[in-house]
Image: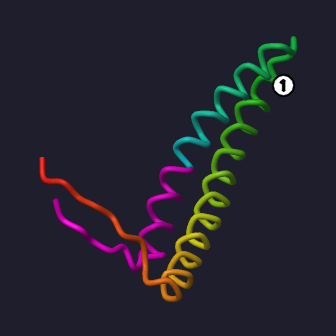
Amino acid sequence: MWNYKLKKISVLSVFKFTLIYGIVIGLILGLIGGLFGGLFVNSFGAFGAGIIGGLIGGIVYGIIFSIVSAFGAWLFNVVSGWIDGIDILVEKK
């Protein structure tokens, strides 16, 4: 087993990862919500609006999620400078 210390996280790396991850999850959840929301209305227009709203909501969710996550990574870096990081224990498989 090895002891390591996590002292810094790349904010840009976190932003890129969570942007793609958030958009994919947001699109999936948005499409599901749009499908179910559109099914309860007897209008094809409302069904299409539910799908489009789900797609737009998914993209917006991904963008907001990535901004909040990048802020969290930045805040970790600031606090880590004060308290000298987080100790982690890694075990070789």
Give x and y (percent) for residue 23. 56, 49
Q: Is residue 92 left or right of residue 81?
A: left
Q: Residue furthest right?
A: 42
Examine the image and state in which quarter residue 71 appears. bottom right
User: Is 80 colored magenta in this rendering?
Assistant: no
Residue drawn at x 36%, y 69% is 87
Give x and y (percent) for residue 2. 18, 65
Examine the image and state in which quarter residue 38 appears. top right
Give x and y (percent) for residue 14. 46, 67
Residue drawn at x 55%, y 41% is 25
User: Is 6 colored magenta in this rendering?
Assistant: yes
Residue drawn at x 67%, y 51% is 61
**Where 40 sits versus 86, above or below?**
above
Is disc 1 placed on a helix, strand or loop? helix
Examine the image and state in which quarter residue 91 appears. bottom left
User: In the rendered image, which residue does mark 1 sit on?
Assistant: 46
The N terminus sits in image quarter: bottom left
Mark 1 crowd level (few <14, some 14–19, many ≥20, 10 Å Cα): some
Q: Is residue 36 left or right of residue 67?
A: right
**Where 77 sits versus 47, above or below?**
below
- Nearest the camera: 2 or 10? 2
**Where 73 sits versus 80, above or below?**
above
Query: Which span of residues is magenta-colored?
Result: 1-22
- Nearest the camera: 74 or 43? 74
Q: Residue furthest bottom?
A: 82
Residue drawn at x 53%, y 72% is 73
Disc 1 marks which amino acid?
Ala
Q: Is residue 49 left or right of residue 76?
A: right
